[in-house]
Amino acid sequence: MNNNGLLLIFSGPSGAGKGTVLKELLNGNDNMKLSVSATTRTPREGECHGVHYFFMTKEEFEEQIANGQMLEHAEYCGKYYGTPSSQIMDWIEEGRDVVLEIEVQGARQIKEKRPDCVSIFVLPPSLEELEKRLRYRNTEDEETIKKRLAVARQEMETARDYDYVIVNDTIERRKIDTLMKQINKIIAAEKLKVSRAKSNIERVLNND
């Protein structure tokens, strides 16, 4: 019987509320794990290896790339960032569902390597609401907010390439509950797909 877990990708623009969605999804769910990314940058104060990131040297990171041990990776400002595959594959084989919160370029790389993954794009209710959320943070200047909105529009264009799209309008508790029901229905349906259940079909037909 195939009891492998799912590889779940969540993407969406800054301000769409991916963090809120995933916190709610992971809360109390012992069968679901959040992937930990790797980086070659130095740890910041309070960051722990294996919890916030896997901190690696440039040589270690490049060795993992060469050995095909990174599901995806990118380089920003001379530092590598990526998703190591070993722990994720171990969890999936144990039957655990693994969640990756990742940007669209990384998601594209993973989908090429793991076409069995389930990709979900988190949309804001509107661009106007997204702008309100970014301004409400009060952490960035006007130029940065405009850049984020321009990037967000580009990222949302890629939502068509994902398996599912959900709209995050989680102002009220009722709406959060509705959103979680939608995501859990997606997960349940994916686990019943014929492509994942072939071994179960053969088992029944062969009376094993």
Image (cartoon, grey):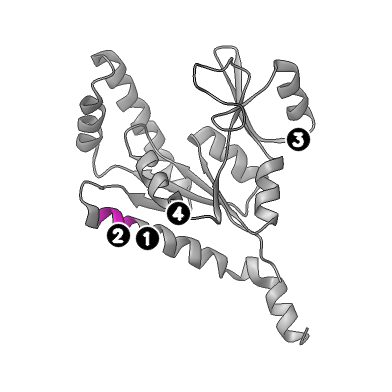
Q: Position of residue 135 (x, y in %)?
A: 22, 25
Q: Position of residue 97 (x, y in %)?
A: 57, 54
Other residues around mark 2 within 10 Å, as few (<14) / some (14–19) / many (≥20): few
- For the image, the number of numbered tags is 4
Mark 2 / mark 4, whichever is N-terminal: 4
User: Residue at label 1?
Assistant: 182
User: Residue at label 2?
Assistant: 178
Dot 4 falls on a residue whose secondary structure is loop
User: Residue at label 4?
Assistant: 28
- The amino acid type found where label 1 is placed reads Gln
Mark 4 / mark 1, whichever is N-terminal: 4
Quadrant of the image containing the N terminus: bottom right
- The amino acid type found where label 4 is placed reads Gly
Residue 112 magenta-drawn?
Answer: no
Q: Residue at x 48, y 53 (%)?
A: 163
Is 141 on the left-hand or right-hand side of 40? left
